[in-house]
Amino acid sequence: SLMTDDSIRVVFHLDPDPLLVGVLRSAVRFQAMQSGLGEAPCTEFAKATEDVCLESITNQTEIVGGLDVTLDTFSDRIEVSIRRHGQTIPAVGLESFALSKIPADERGGFNGLELLSRADRVLFSTEVGVARTTLVKFLHPK
């Protein structure tokens, strides 16, 4: 059965261990399925979340205390916010999009435009000692 119109929030804390990211990917995929997204969009959005988390863990030298991830589901969208403490730049930045014509394997990391094809919106913000990347996937009207 699909979820109701009530919003749902799930909060995760991940130690900086790439093996833990699979659990988060499964949770995002499950919640997207419950929200009524089709199979392919659910898988793609979950993969986008996994990519950003792995990029945060593997390419950042100053992660203090791991990642805090919030999965919010609203009646019209799903948002995944990934916060890294001790780092003042987001996991994916302008270079991910500016260098997107260069294959990801040649420059490390992933392709920013590919990320945008999996999520409808990618937001970045920084606060004192915390960088946040938020992925948004809009749901189809019911």
Image (cartoon, grey):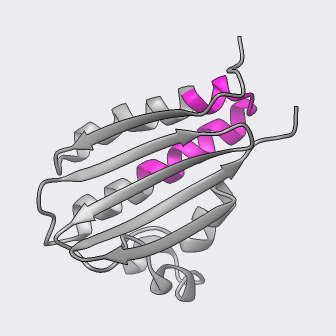
Q: Quadrant of residue 33?
A: top right
Does the magenta-highlighted stretch encompass residue 34? yes
Q: Position of residue 123 (x, y in %)?
A: 54, 69
Which segment is the magenta one? 31-50
| Front residue (pair 27, 55) | 27
Percent x, y of residue 20: 25, 38
- Vertical order, 74 against 116 (above or below): above
Indicate the quadrant containing the N terminus: top left, top right, bottom left or bottom right. Answer: top right
Where is the C terminus found, in terms of image quarters?
top right
Point 32% across, 71% down: residue: 131
- The x, y position of residue 52, in whole percent, is 41, 59
Is residue 39 left or right of 84 when viewed as pictured? right
Residue at image coords 38%, 56%: 82
Q: What residue is at 34 percent from the left and 63 percent from the top?
A: 55
Work out whether 48 lies above or below 123: above
Q: Residue furthest top?
A: 1
Residue drawn at x 12%, y 54% as measured from the top left: 65
Q: Nearer the viewer, residue 123 or 103?
A: 123
The secondary structure making up most of the magenta span is helix
Q: Is residue 137 magenta?
A: no
Q: Residue furthest right?
A: 142
Front residue of this view, candidates 42 and 106: 42
Instruction: Give the answer, above or below, for where 106 lies relative to 37.
Output: below
Total residue callouts: 0
Q: Would you place residue 139 above or below residue 37 in this image?
A: below
Give how far across and how far down residue 77 sits, in percent.
68, 45
Residue 136 is left or right of residue 36, and the answer is left
Quadrant location of residue 44?
top right
